[in-house]
Image (tube, rainbow, N blue to C red):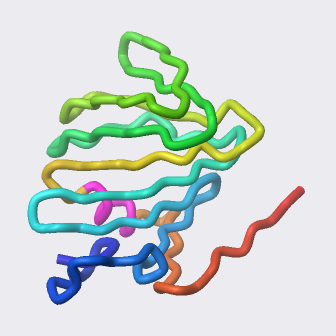
């Protein structure tokens, strides 16, 4: 099992984020640690950015907001919730949802998926660019 989708470093009990690869998307980036039973991620969603409507058929997902503000929408109901630091979001397997950053600062969240797996699907998507551990993402400002 990987660090970020490919390898777990079982010899390490403490892993720093710079030791993890970074998945880069148009409006977000995620660092993942895939363990034996779950995956743990730190996500940064750019201001105005959105994780489009999607689901994880085989995994429960829990989000915890560290900073920024946003919205989560559950489908097909269109049920919308404002999210801010301290908000926990429980997303059952297969539940369609979307998240967006609605403030001027990035929406920073912790992601936990049980069992692991969604991080691998994201890594394999054509929208994903993978940066190796230690490489700093380059931002483009308009």
Above or below: residue 36 compared with residue 69: below
Residue 67 at x, y = what percent? 58, 41
Q: Quadrant of residue 89?
A: top left
Q: In the drawing, does residue 123 fall left or right of residue 142?
A: left
Residue 20 at x, y = what percent? 41, 78
Is residue 7 a member of the stretch shown in magenta? no
Query: Which quadrant, please, contains the N terminus?
Result: bottom left
* Residue at figure coordinates x 30%, y 68% from the top left: 33
* Residue at figure coordinates x 49%, y 17% from the top left: 81
* Residue at figure coordinates x 58%, y 55% from the top left: 28
Q: Which residues are magenta?
A: 118-124
What residue occupies the far front of the structure in this picture? 14
Q: Nearer the viewer, residue 92 or 136?
A: 136
* Residue at figure coordinates x 43%, y 28% from the top left: 87
Query: Which quadrant, please, contains the C terminus?
Result: bottom right
Q: Nearer the viewer, residue 10 or 118?
A: 10
Residue 56 at x, y = what percent? 26, 42
């Amino acid at each position: 099992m990987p660090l970020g989708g490919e390898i777990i470093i079982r010899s390490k009990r403490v892993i720093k984020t710079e030791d993890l690869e970074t998945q880069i998307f148009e409006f977000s980036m995620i660092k993942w640690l895939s363990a034996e039973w779950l995956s743990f991620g730190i996500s940064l969603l750019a201001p105005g950015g959105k994780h489009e409507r999607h689901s994880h058929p085989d995994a429960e997902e829990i989000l915890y907001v560290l900073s920024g503000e946003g919205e989560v929408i559950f489908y097909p109901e269109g049920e919308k919730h404002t999210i801010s630091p301290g908000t926990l979001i429980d997303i059952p397997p297969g539940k369609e949802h979307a998240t967006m950053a609605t403030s001027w600062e990035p929406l920073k969240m912790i992601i936990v998926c049980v069992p692991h797996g969604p991080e691998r699907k994201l890594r394999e998507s054509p929208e994903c660019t993978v940066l190796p551990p230690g490489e700093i993402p380059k931002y483009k400002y308009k």
